[in-house]
């Protein structure tokens, strides 16, 4: 199985290591033709505003939007911001792949980065995981079709709707491959 990782900016290699450990082939996605043979894509953490600029510069925005509308995609932190329907703080354009409203940098300065124990919901089929949050956004609203997989306290931090998944934390930075394995399970053709 070939899985793409958007490789314009941000944390690409830690995802590639997890995917390879699970037996997937990794394609670094920088231009439209890189989307051709992949079964799913990870949009990694980094800086969402920088990614938006480079997506337009590389003329990748429209094709990535079309790809994420029809294929499995997982957005991590900045990647989650890119996939959301609506972005606040400040508002910015997004790919609108999932009916979620997300607020950027929403943990405030004092708590900009922390590690939290996550709470599994009955929808999460794997071992529990802990969450590394780095200047993370918060999911402020989600449509009726959006399923919560993992929570931090009472709030959703990993959600899925059909072929689209968001996590506001970084599973590529902790031990274990549960979350990558879960994503691969719905990338199977
Ligand atoms: N603060 C970043 C943004 O708004 C996201 C941070 C991250 O991806 N770790 O794009």
Image (tube, rainbow, N blue to C red):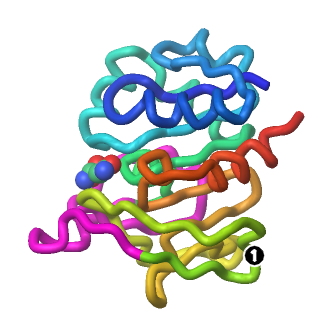
Locate residue 117, reporting x and y percent: 45, 76
Locate residue 129, reporting x and y percent: 55, 67
Q: Which residue is mark 1?
A: 123
Relative placement, left or right, of 175 versus 113 is: right
> Which of 91 and 76 lies nearest the eye of the viewer?
76
Res 141 visible:
no
Judged from this view, the residue extending furthest toward the front is 175
Q: Quadrant of the C terminus?
A: top right
Locate residue 140, reporting x and y percent: 41, 77
Q: Residue at x 64, y 46 (%)?
A: 180
Q: Main secondary structure of the magenta part?
A: loop
Location of residue 65 with respect to 171 vertically, above or below = above
Res 18 visible:
yes
* Residue 81 is one of the magenta-drawn residues: no
Judged from this view, the residue extending furthest toward the right is 189
Q: Secondary structure at mark 1?
A: loop
Location of residue 39 with respect to 151 vertically, above or below = above
Relative placement, left or right, of 147 versus 109 is: right
Q: Residue at x 50, y 76 (%)?
A: 118
Locate residue 182, reporting x and y percent: 72, 53
Total numbered circles: 1
Relative placement, left or right, of 54 versus 160 is: left
Q: Residue at x 63, y 75 (%)?
A: 148
Does the beta carbon at disc 1 come under 8 Å from ligand 1? no
User: Residue 132 occupies which quadrant of the picture?
Assistant: bottom left
Q: Which residues are magenta?
A: 87-116
């Amino acid at each position: 199985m070939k899985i793409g990782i958007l490789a314009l900016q941000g944390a690409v290699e830690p995802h590639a290591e997890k995917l390879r450990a699970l037996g997937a082939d990794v394609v670094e996605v920088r231009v439209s033709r890189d989307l051709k043979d992949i079964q799913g894509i990870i949009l990694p953490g980094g800086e969402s505003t920088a990614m938006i600029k480079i997506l337009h510069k590389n003329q990748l925005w429209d094709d990535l939007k079309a790809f994420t509308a029809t294929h499995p995609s997982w957005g991590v932190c900045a990647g989650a911001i890119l996939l959301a329907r609506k972005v606040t703080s400040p508002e910015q354009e997004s790919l609108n792949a999932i009916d979620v409203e997300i607020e950027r940098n929403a943990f405030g300065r004092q708590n900009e980065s922390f590690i939290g124990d996550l709470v599994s919901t009955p929808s999460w089929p794997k071992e529990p995981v802990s969450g590394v949050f780095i200047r993370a956004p918060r999911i402020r609203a989600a449509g009726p079709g959006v399923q919560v997989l993992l929570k931090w306290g009472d709030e959703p931090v990993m959600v899925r709707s059909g072929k689209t998944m968001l996590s506001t934390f970084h599973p590529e930075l902790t031990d274990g491959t549960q979350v990558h394995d879960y994503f691969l399970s719905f990338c199977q053709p």
